[in-house]
Image (cartoon, grey):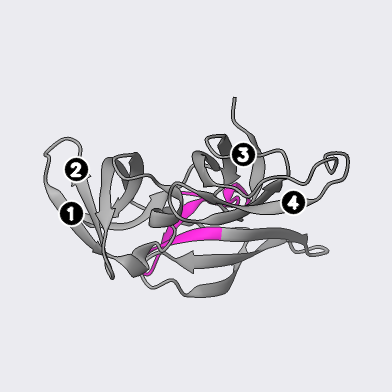
C-alpha cells in the first residue's frame, strides 16, 4: 500500500477497481492538521482525468499492472497489430489505445505493453527514440551560423523541425512526449 506522500508522477495506483496513473502531484501542509496531497490522475481504461485529494492518513493500493514485451507489426486504418514475443500470438488493438505507436515505433520493434486484467491498456514509452531521416530539403549556403530549422520527414512518416545541417540518411533522436528533435544520434 502507498501512503499519499509515496505518490509521484507516473506512479500507477488502483481506485474503485480501475488503474490510474498519477500525472501531477502537489503536497500541501495544513497548519496543525497534517498535510494533504493534491493529484491529477488519469484513468488508464477510459482516459478520463480526475483531480483527487488524499489526506495524510489515506492508504492507496498500487495498480496490479504487469508489463509484457510485444512486437509492433503494423497498423491499418483503425487497428494496431502486435505479436506477443513469448507465445507468438497476434494481438489486435484499436488504434485509439495509443495514436503515437505508428508515429514513433518502427514496424518490427519491441515495446512494453501495460496489462491489466489480462488486457493491454497502454504502453510504457521510452523517453526518446532514434529514427532515420528519409526526406530533407537542402540547406541554404552560408546559413549554418543561425539557429534556423527546416522540416524533415522521418522513416515512420512524421515530420519534425531539425537544424539546417541535417540531411537524408541521418539518424535523429526524437522526444516521444513532444515529438521534438533532440539531437543527431551517434
The numbered dot on residue 149 is: 4
Which of these two is toward me, 108 or 169? Answer: 169
Residue 184 against residue 53 in the figure, above or below: above
Disc 3 versus disc 1: distance between alpha carbons? 37 Å
Disc 4 versus disc 1: distance between alpha carbons? 39 Å
Q: How crowded is the residue under tag 2: few (<14 C-alpha within 10 Å), some, or many (20+)?
A: some
Which of these two is toward me, 168 or 8? Answer: 168
> Element type at marker 3?
loop
Is residue 55 visible in the rendered structure shown here? yes
Q: How crowded is the residue under tag 3: few (<14 C-alpha within 10 Å), some, or many (20+)?
A: some
The residue carrying mark 2 is 84
Would residue 3 be counted in the magenta stretch? yes
The numbered dot on residue 167 is: 3
The residue carrying mark 1 is 91
Please identify the residue farthest to the right as the structure is shown. 145
Q: Is residue 42 left or right of residue 110?
A: right
Amino acid at each position: 500500500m502507498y501512503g499519499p506522500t509515496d505518490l509521484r508522477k507516473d506512479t500507477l495506483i488502483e481506485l474503485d477497481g480501475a488503474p490510474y496513473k498519477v500525472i501531477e502531484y502537489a503536497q500541501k501542509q495544513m497548519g496543525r492538521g497534517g498535510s494533504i496531497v493534491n493529484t491529477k490522475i488519469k484513468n488508464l481504461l477510459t482516459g478520463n482525468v480526475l483531480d483527487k485529494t488524499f489526506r495524510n492518513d489515506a492508504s492507496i493500493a498500487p495498480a496490479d499492472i504487469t508489463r509484457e514485451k510485444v512486437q509492433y507489426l503494423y497498423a491499418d486504418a483503425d487497428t494496431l497489430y502486435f505479436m506477443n514475443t513469448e507465445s507468438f500470438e497476434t494481438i489486435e488493438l484499436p488504434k485509439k489505445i495509443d495514436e503515437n505507436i505508428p508515429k514513433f515505433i518502427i514496424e518490427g520493434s519491441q515495446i512494453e505493453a501495460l496489462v491489466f486484467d489480462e488486457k493491454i491498456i497502454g504502453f510504457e514509452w521510452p523517453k526518446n527514440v532514434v529514427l532515420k531521416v528519409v526526406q530533407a530539403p537542402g540547406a541554404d549556403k552560408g546559413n549554418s551560423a543561425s539557429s534556423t530549422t527546416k522540416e524533415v520527414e522521418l522513416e515512420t512518416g512524421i515530420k519534425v523541425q531539425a537544424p539546417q545541417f541535417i540531411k537524408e540518411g541521418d539518424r535523429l533522436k526524437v522526444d516521444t512526449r513532444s515529438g521534438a528533435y533532440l539531437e543527431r544520434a551517434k
